[in-house]
Amino acid sequence: MSEQFDLTIIGTGPGGYVCAIRAAQLGLKVAVVEKRETHGGTCLNIGCIPSKALLHASELYEEAGHNFSKLGIAVEGLNVDLAGMLKHKDDTVKSNTSGIEFLFKKNKITPFHGWGSIEAPGKVKVTADDGSTQTIESKNIVIATGSDSANLPGIEIDEKRVVTSTGALDLETVPEKMIVVGAGVIGLELGSVWSRLGAEVTVVEFLDRILPGMDGEVAKNFQRTLKKQGFKFKLSTKVTNVDKSGDSLKVTVEPAAGGDAEELDADVVLVAIGRTPYTEGLGLEEAGVELDERRRVKIDNHYKTNVDGIYAIGDVVVGPMLAHKAEDEGVAIAEILAGQAGHVNYDVIPGVVYTSPEVASVGKTEEEVKDAGIDYKIGKFQFTANGRAKAMLSTDGLVKIIADKNTDRVLGAHIVGKGAGEMIHELAVLMEFGGSAEDLARTCHAHPTMSEAVREAALGCGDGTIHM
Ligand SMILES: Cc1cc2nc3c(=O)[nH]c(=O)nc-3n(C[C@H](O)[C@H](O)[C@H](O)COP(=O)(O)OP(=O)(O)OC[C@H]3O[C@@H](n4cnc5c(N)ncnc54)[C@H](O)[C@@H]3O)c2cc1C
Ligand SMILES: NC(=O)c1ccc[n+]([C@@H]2O[C@H](COP(=O)([O-])OP(=O)(O)OC[C@H]3O[C@@H](n4cnc5c(N)ncnc54)[C@H](O)[C@@H]3O)[C@@H](O)[C@H]2O)c1
C-alpha cells in the first residue's frame, strides 16, 4: 500500500508553505505539491519579495539624487546599474525560496514537484513535467493554488513591452514612457520603481480615484504626493487598445463613461487590474468542489469546501489577496486539522502599499464607518509637525485614527508616511485587544520618533493634539 499522509497541500505560496510547517509542527504527516521549480509561490518568486528588493534599491537611488544634497552629502556620477539592481532582486528571491526548502527539510515535509490535481477526495494526482503521474493518498487536502494576473480583454501580454507585474520586475532597460493600467497596489508600487529610475509614468484608472478600498481622504492625500513625484494620472479612463506594430506602443484610452478616444505613446504598458483565483485544471468540478460567482473556491468559516476532507485558503478563496492573510489562514487550518481552534480575525488585517511614502491601513475606512451608521470621531496628525520627520526630510503624509464616538474603541487607522508599514502594527495590536484611542494616547512613545504622530492622532480623538 502507498504511503498515507494526514495532509497534502497543493501550492507552496505563503498560504501553503506556512500551513505545511505549522501542521508538521503539530504532528501531522504532511506532503506538498508545487508546479514551480522553487517554493514560496507568487509572493516570494514574482511578488512581494522581488518587488520590495527593487522598491528599496530604487528608493535609495531617488534619495541619493534628490535629498542627499539637502543633507549635506555631495554625490557625483550617480548612475543606475540596472543589471546590478536586478541581480540584487534575483539574489533576494533565491535566498528566500531556498529558505523554504530548508524549512521543509527541517520539519520533515515531503515535497512533490509537478502539477497537482484532485483525483477524488483523499487522492491527489501529481503530473510531472515529463507527463508521468503518481497519486498521493491523503486524509485531508488543502487547495492553496493562489492567483494569477487578470487580463485586459483584447490586449495580449508578451511580458516584454506589454507586461504584467512579472514582466515589470524584469525589464532590461528603463522605459522612457510607461503606461500603468490600474491605480491599485501593483500599479503604484511598480510604477514607483520605474518612475524613480527615470521613466515618465502615466497611470490610467477606470474609477475616479486611486487605491479603491483604502480610506478616500488618505488616498487623495497620497495621490497629491505621487503627482509631486512626477506621476501623471488619468482617472475615470479605460484602455481600449494597444497597437504594437510600431517601435513605440500606441495606447488608445477613452473616458470610462464613454466619449472621445485619445492615443498615448509608451515604451512599456503594465497591466495591473487585479488578480484572478487559480482554479483551472485542479479537478475541482470532477471532485464536486463548488466555486463562487468570482470563481474562488467556496469555503465555510473553517476553510472547508462542500466536499469532506477538502479545504482551501489564501488568494484562491474570498478576502484580501495578501500574503499575511494567506499565512494566517494556513496556520488556522493546520490548527483546526490538528484538533485545535484555528481562527483569523478578519477585522484586523493590515494592508501596506510599499511606495515612498508608504501607505498603511488597518480596520475600517471613514467611508465604511459612515455606511455602517456608526457614530465616530477622528483624530489626525500631519508629519509636517513631527520633529523626526523634519530631520529626515520625510514630512509628507499623515496619521488618521477613527474611533467609536461613544466607546472610544479604535475602529480603523490609516497612515501615509515613511515607515507607515511598520508603524501600523501598534494599531493592529491595540485593535486586536479592543483598545481605545485613550489607551494609545496614554502610552508613552519614545522621542523623537515617527510613531509620536500616531500617539498625537490618538490624542486628537480626545482632548486634542499637543504639537499641532
Ligand atoms: C507583484 C506583486 C507584489 C505583491 N506584494 C505583496 C506584498 O507586498 N504584500 C502582500 O501581502 N502581498 C503581496 N502580493 C500578493 C501575494 O503575493 C499573494 O497574496 C500571496 O502570494 C498569496 O499566497 P497564496 O499562498 O494564496 O498563493 P500563491 O503565492 O500564488 O502560491 C500559490 C502556489 O501554488 C502553485 N500552484 C498553482 N496551481 C498548482 C497546481 N495545480 N499544482 C501545483 N502547484 C500549483 C503556484 O505555482 C504557486 O507557487 C503581491 C503580489 C504581486 C503579484
Ligand atoms: N503591498 C501589497 O500588499 C501588495 C502589493 C502588490 C499586490 N498586492 C495584491 O495583489 C492583488 C492585485 O494587485 P493589483 O494592483 O493588480 O489589483 P488592485 O485590485 O489593487 O487594483 C486594480 C486597479 O485596477 C483598476 N482597474 C480594473 N480594471 C481596469 C481597467 N479595465 N482599466 C483601468 N483600471 C482598471 C481597479 O479599479 C483598481 O484600481 C491585490 O489584491 C493586492 O492586494 C498586494
Image (tube, rainbow, N blue to C red):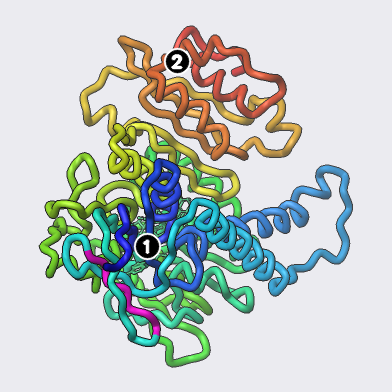
Give the camera-side residue of 430 and 262: 430
Q: Secondary structure at mark 2?
A: helix
Residue 84 at x, y = what percent? 72, 70
Residue type at mark 1 is Gly
Q: State how far apart marks 2 and 1 are (Cα).
A: 41 Å
**Image quarter hosting the N terminus:** bottom left
**Ligand 1 quadrant assignment:** bottom left
Stretch of the chain drawn in magenta: 123-129
Q: Is residue 253 something one can see in this rendering?
A: yes
Residue 200 appears in which quarter of the rendering? bottom right
- Total marks in image: 2
Quadrant of the frame with the C terminus: top right
Horizontal and vertical percent position of residue 426: 52, 26
Q: Is residue 58 highlighted in magenta?
A: no
In primary-sequence order, the first of circles 2 and 1 is 1
Q: Between 127 and 160, which is closer to the camera in this rendering? A: 127
Residue 45 versus residue 339 in the image, above or below: below
Q: Are marks 2 and 1 in contact (CB under 8 Å)?
A: no
Q: Which residue is mark 1?
A: 11
Q: Position of residue 413 (x, y in %)?
A: 44, 29
Residues packed near mark 1 inside 10 Å, few (<14), some (14 to 19) or many (20 plus): many
Q: Which mark is residue 44?
A: none
The residue type indicated by label 2 comes to Ala
Please name which of the two marks, 2 or 1, marks the residue nearer to the observer. 1
State the residue at coordinates (47%, 58%).
43
Q: Residue at x 65, y 70 (%)?
A: 86
Q: Which residue is mark 2?
A: 437
In the image: residue 73, left or right of residue 115:
right
Q: Is mark 1 within 8 Å of ligand 1?
A: yes
For image coordinates 34% across by 71% down, the residue present is 239
